[in-house]
Image: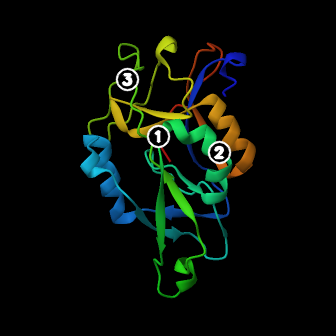
Amino acid sequence: MTDSTSHPLAVYRLLPSMGEFRTLLLGGSLRKLIRWQITGSATDLPSSFSGSWDGNPGWRKGEFPSGYPGAPILSRRVADLLAADLSESGPFVPVVIEAADPAFPADADGSDDYVLHLVDQVVDCLDTRRSSKPKKTTGEITKAVFRAEALPVGLAAFRVPEFRGGVYWNGWAVDRLTGLLGDDIEARLVWSEDPSATPHPAPWGF
């Protein structure tokens, strides 16, 4: 159950914050995700992904470790805690961790349990007349304005037809995630029905 009725509707982009923890890179398996996001075909639906840790080996491993716009990755702990909230947005797909550097074989010792939240809900809710046009190279929409009456407030996360490679998060889901992860996660406001709220100027940037 969401609490969207008690707060102004708001949509965010989530990414790891800049801290002393490691992030996950998907490498070549990212192509599988992009292909499925474009085609939406069941035959392109990935059954798993491979990833490798990036950053100082002495730092702890993040629990929301992917900054790619369309690839929200969660630790199994967080995924289990939020399973009921995220289930309507799409399935969890396992991420197999590989060692990026032979000098650190412990990075792939099997102890890590991470999943990619494969957001399969594509919703026609963007106000295209008031939004900026998608970038030709990435499809990113710098200024997104949503039609409040069409916003899928019951979903934790969703995508839009105009930018299939990006995952948007509803405000109530962001509250759940930030409540669990605190400063490990950065929430960039994309849009709000509150006219006094200021969206992030570059929500899809790094």
Q: Please state the horizontal and vertical placement of residue 160, each as a whole percent of the image.
A: 39, 29
Name the foreground residue: 129 vs 162.
162
Q: Does 59 sit left or right of 116 as displayed?
A: right
The tag earlier along the polypeptide, 3 or 1, is 3
Q: Which label is found at residue 132?
A: 3
Three-letter amino acid code at disc 1? Answer: Trp
Q: Name the residue under label 1.
A: 204
Q: In the rendering, at what x and y percent does residue 202 appear? A: 49, 35
- The quadrant in which residue 194 appears is top right
What's the CA distance linking mark 2 and mark 3?
A: 32 Å
Secondary element under disc 3, as helix, strand or loop, is loop
Give the distance between the C-alpha atoms of the residues marked 3 and 1, in whole angstroms.
13 Å
Q: In this view, does 102 lie above or below 162?
A: below
**Kind of residue sitting beneath label 3:** Ser
In the image, is residue 83 above or below residue 155? below
Q: Residue 82 carries which label?
A: 2
Residue 202 at least partly seen = no
* Residue type at the position of mark 2: Leu
Please tell me whether mark 2 sits on a helix, a strand or a loop: loop
Q: Position of residue 124 (x, y in %)?
A: 38, 22
At a point 45% along the width and 45% down the height, the residue shown is 69
Whether 131 is drawn above or below 85: the answer is above
Within 10 Å of disc 2 (Cα), the crowding (few <14, some 14-19, many 20+) is some
Q: Residue at x 73, y 47 (%)?
A: 180
Foreground residue among 155 and 142: 155
- Which label sits in the foreground, 2 or 1? 2
Residue 77 or residue 192, whichever sits in front: 77
* Sequence-first tag of 2 and 3: 2
Left or right of 135? Residue 201 is right
Residue 1, position as x, y percentages in the image: 67, 28
